[in-house]
Amino acid sequence: MKQVHNFNAGPCVLPDQAIENSIEALKDFMGTGMSVIEVSHRSKEWSAVMDECRALWKELLHIPDTHEVLFLGGGASMQFLYVAMNFLENKAGYLETGVWAKKALKEAKGLGNAYAVASSADRTYCYIPKGYEIPEDLDYFHITTNNTIYGTEIRHDMDCPVPLIADMSSDIMSRPVDVSKYALIYGGAQKNVGPAGVAFAIVRKDALGKVSRYIPTMLDYRTHVDGGSMFNTPPVFPIFVMKETLKWLKGIGGVEAIHKINEHKASLLYQEIDRNSLFRGTAEKEDRSIMNVCFVMAPGYEELQDRFLDYAKGRGMVGIKGHRSVGGFRASIYNACPEESVKALIACMQDFEKENL
Ligand SMILES: *Cc1c(COP(=O)(O)O)cnc(C)c1O
């Protein structure tokens, strides 16, 4: 049983089962008499963990044989550089939907010709741009499917005339994804699939090797495809916890099952935001994220913001303060966030309304 209602944006709530099994493995890993952080990463026990983790990814996301899943250090931010190193030859296009998208674009600009095909910066990224055209001469088109800070999300797998690359840091495994439509899907683990310290990359193998630049060994996806993500010592403990998190997800019915749960949790919370006269949602309704729910005090009630934060804190809510760049509130309701936490937040908003209206 959780002691608090954890709405942190990342690192964030993880399944109790994953945490408990990881504690056991820290004490004694598979009867080896050693901790999981004490065994050789070349041991057969560790290899079995890597194999199981990879197999869970492939099973849960129905990853086709054309793609490989990699586990890498450096977080999603390092993947921004990997993307440009491995895919940028002449020109790359980015969909600028927030701070993370801009940071990804910056790395590509540092290596060559890259630009924003469309942007929603004009209204603080509160919507997903539409009606733009993706030029057919791009090496790739890069999207951020879930904009963690603004609470907007691209919740479908778009058709794209050029290789499609997606940062799915904050919505991976939250909905079924047609992996075959992407040349690369990547992200940090610490929102939906594990603790900080490991990033994932699902790469289409035949999309690699198309650039002429020298790619440093560690930044070359082929190094890690060939080495089974064990070219060098992998982040063993984060990978172990990730494996346990995916085992939990499989146990409750996989991505298809969690998708229904996520949609339900999000719709409960958005309904309350739309009903409650003290609050107002910030993202365009059609682009609302089912992972990060962003809202502010309604016009006329702005001065109640700090009081609500205190009130919610007193009721066990953690992490509902909005990102420092946008203010307001953000409830991150990732896979492991139980429905009871969402309901507790809703009750808190309702009681606050009764006391302050
Ligand atoms: C959190 C986040 C990142 C950054 O992840 P790091 O692992 O901290 O580098 C990048 N993109 C998105 C969409 C995120 O939510």
Image (tube, rainbow, N blue to C red):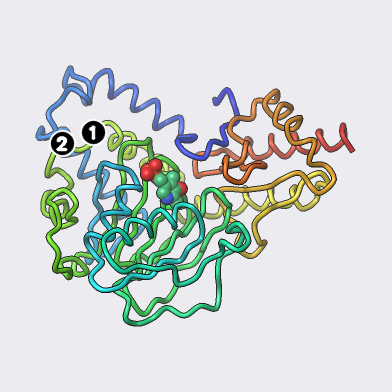
337 sits left or right of 294 in the view: left
Vertical comparison of 21 with 74: above or below: above
**Cα distance in 3D space between marks 1 and 2:** 8 Å
237 sits left or right of 269 in the view: left
Residue sitting at the far bottom: 136
Please name whichever residue, 69 or 120, is drawn nearer the observer in this view of the structure: 120
User: Pointer 1: what residue?
Assistant: 236
* Rendered location of residue 195, percent (x, y): 38, 35
Disc 1, SS: helix
Do the residues under discs 1 and 2 have CB atoms within 8 angstroms? yes
Vertical comparison of 159 with 326: above or below: below
Please name whichever residue, 28 or 236, is drawn nearer the observer in this view of the structure: 236
* Rendered location of residue 12, percent (x, y): 48, 35
Tell me the residue at 15%/57% (across/down).
Answer: 215
213 sits left or right of 76 in the view: left
Vertical comparison of 315 with 110: above or below: above
> Which amino acid type is shown beneath numbered disc 1?
Val
User: Pointer 2: what residue?
Assistant: 233
Q: How many marks?
A: 2
Tell me the residue at 44%/57% (across/down).
Answer: 101
Disc 2, SS: loop
Tell me the residue at 50%/44% (across/down).
Answer: 335
The residue carrying pointer 2 sits among few (fewer than 14), some (14 to 19) or many (20 or more) residues within 10 Å by Cα, namely few
The residue carrying pointer 1 sits among few (fewer than 14), some (14 to 19) or many (20 or more) residues within 10 Å by Cα, namely many
* Rendered location of residue 168, percent (x, y): 41, 55
> Which of the 4 image quadrants contains residue 61?
bottom left
